Image: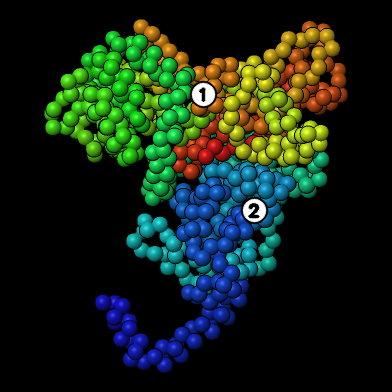
Amino acid sequence: MAGNLDQEAHIADPESEEDFEDDEEEEEAEDWDDWSAEDGEESSSGLLCLFCDANFSSCSPLFDHCASLHRFDFHRVKEALALDFYGAFKLINYVRSQVAENRCWSCGLVFPSKHDLQDHLHETIDFEKVKPLSFDDRYLKPFLQEDSLLYSFDEDGEGEDDCPVVVDKEELAMELKNLGELSIDGDNLLEKAESSSGSIDGNVLKGAADVSSSDLNTAGSAKDAIVSRADIRAQIGLSNGKHKDERVVSSHKKLAASDVRRVNESYFGAYSSFGIHREMLSDKVRMDAYSQAILGNQSLFNGAVVMDVGCGTGILSLFAAQAGASEVIAVEASEKMAAVATQIAKDNHFWHSPNGSINNKGGVVKVVNGMVEELDKCIQLQPHSVDVLLSEWMGYCLLYETMLSSVLSARDRWLKPGGAILPDTATIFAAGFGRGATSLPFWERVYGFDMSTIGKEIVEDAARNPIVDVMSESDLVTNPVIVQTFDLVTMKPDEVDFTASIELETSSSPTENQATTMCYGVVLWFETGFTSRFCREQPAVLSTSPHTLKTHWAQTILTFREPIAMLPRKADDTDKRSQGAGIEGSPAEKIHLRVSIVRAPEHRSIDISLEAAAICSDGRKVTYPVQIFNLS
């Protein structure tokens, strides 16, 4: 009705309305000299991303791009800081000013290039530290003179408020006029932030104040441009408190339901490929561990109600039925694979018909198509009625695919008190690897020609992107150490995200005239345990270690930006060499690592941060800039 009334009024006197609009536009043009577009019109240049040169026609795809690629969720930040229109206006200008200085808008660290800043961008850990920085009234002045985003961002609201914000642009123009000429100065900004709030962590601001752009741009190497250990700790959200406080808070944010659905459809769709299932069923290490744990512990399964989370072809469900389970609930989110698992159960006479007809061998397998988090929408099942929770949930680096969260959800909802979960433990290991595990040796001499430039470029790229590949145990140059252990019976869902500190020491024993060992990075693998807690008759272990048969999980390889020289300490070694650590002239006795693995903003992906420090036997230490790897 309102649309029709407006149309009639327009037709009644079009000339008077045009005159009114002309006058109004002239008045606005006088008050809005700083703006490049008239009210209600879009800039011809489009909407520029806050962090890169990408342009968008509307705000919604721009903010989706910022959230997925640059870890900046505008709507989440706006909500967390309780920003009104003016606050959000200032936030946009603040972020643009920081990006222009290659400074992280969230933690304040400065980087030598825009590319380095892009690699560093991370989720906001503590909004209270950002609030005083972005609330300065200087950011009411547009940082870009023709920034279409400043008068468009509120149009694509998330739909949470029934009443849109009404902006008095004349009032805002007056405020801008009163601000006068302003400049964005990083050092002054930090000083003001420090003086305006006593709650700001000095370590966070110290990184931006002590490491200037000029210092970083003139640095000769990564070691010269080093950010201090305290700065790196602040960068990944760590404090000096208890271990619980030091854990990196999960970067797994609340995603729009449509985004999660899209990722899930792609994820479960990928598992509709029979090639993937053939690869998993051909994995001898995987199949031997599960068959031993299930068929070797029939006292656990005999007469039990079993739930198989993510059943795929249903192989584990068939094992459970074979071991004597009275009922097996096989949950599979892929519609295609649920149908396949049903047919396989029928073909092997283990399928339980919904109409009550049971095959002659004892039909106990019920295949349910759906996500385990929504299982109560699919079938009628009493909470805490499952005796054994079974799943092969592990992804690359153990936690990729984040299916562990689904298993824990099923545990809390369906498993009986004291019920069994298989596997019941999981452990991530790490070791340093040498030059032989890189592509450098191959490219040094190819049919008599030096192609080492290619090898160097590949290694540089590997320092930004994790590699999933099989590594030979002969390429390990340090002893393996445990990074993190999970007890699936007791762990909490948020403990999927963690930070751990480890030390790597060379695996060779000290000898006279021993050559220096170069460590090129860290390789991660995992083991899952079917321990005697539940598997009393026959415990089992599934290992993806380089020391065992290869598996389809392989190992996850994280390459340092530059190799670290290592040499074991001898009893009479006084280590009076030149300054520095981790270089040929002054090799490190050990490498200290802080490893963080958290769920990434992209659903089912993980982020791995790596902070390394080379430590000599006399205590000299060199800390390297943090590296962040995304496994997706």
Please tell me which of labels 2 and 1 falls first in the chain.
2
Residue bearing the label numbered 2: 99
Q: Which amino acid does label 2 sit on?
A: Val
Residue bearing the label numbered 1: 551
Say what secondary structure mark 1 lies in. loop
Position of residue 65 in the picture relative to residue 508 (left or right): left
Q: Which residue is drawn at 35% across and 10% down?
A: 296
Q: Quadrant of residue 559?
A: top right
Say what secondary structure mark 2 lies in. helix
**Quadrant where the N terminus lies?**
bottom left
- Mark 2 or 1: in front is 1
Q: Which amino acid does label 1 sit on?
A: Thr
Q: Residue at x 32, y 19 (%)?
A: 319
Position of residue 44 in the picture relative to residue 268 (left or right): right
Can residue 193 be seen here? The reply is: yes
Can residue 85 be seen here? The reply is: no
Q: Which of 581 and 337 is in front in this view?
A: 337
Disc 2 crowd rating (10 Å Cα; few below 14, some 14-19, many 20+) is some
Position of residue 25 in the picture relative to residue 534 (left or right): right
Residue 189 in picture, x, y percent from top left = 66, 52
Per the model, the C-alpha gap separating discs 2 and 1 is 43 Å
Q: Quadrant of residue 156?
A: bottom left
Q: Nearer the viewer, residue 490 or 349?
A: 349
Q: Which residue is drawn at 82% across and 24% down?
A: 584
Q: In which quarter of the image is residue 443?
A: top right
Disc 1 crowd rating (10 Å Cα; few below 14, some 14-19, many 20+) is many
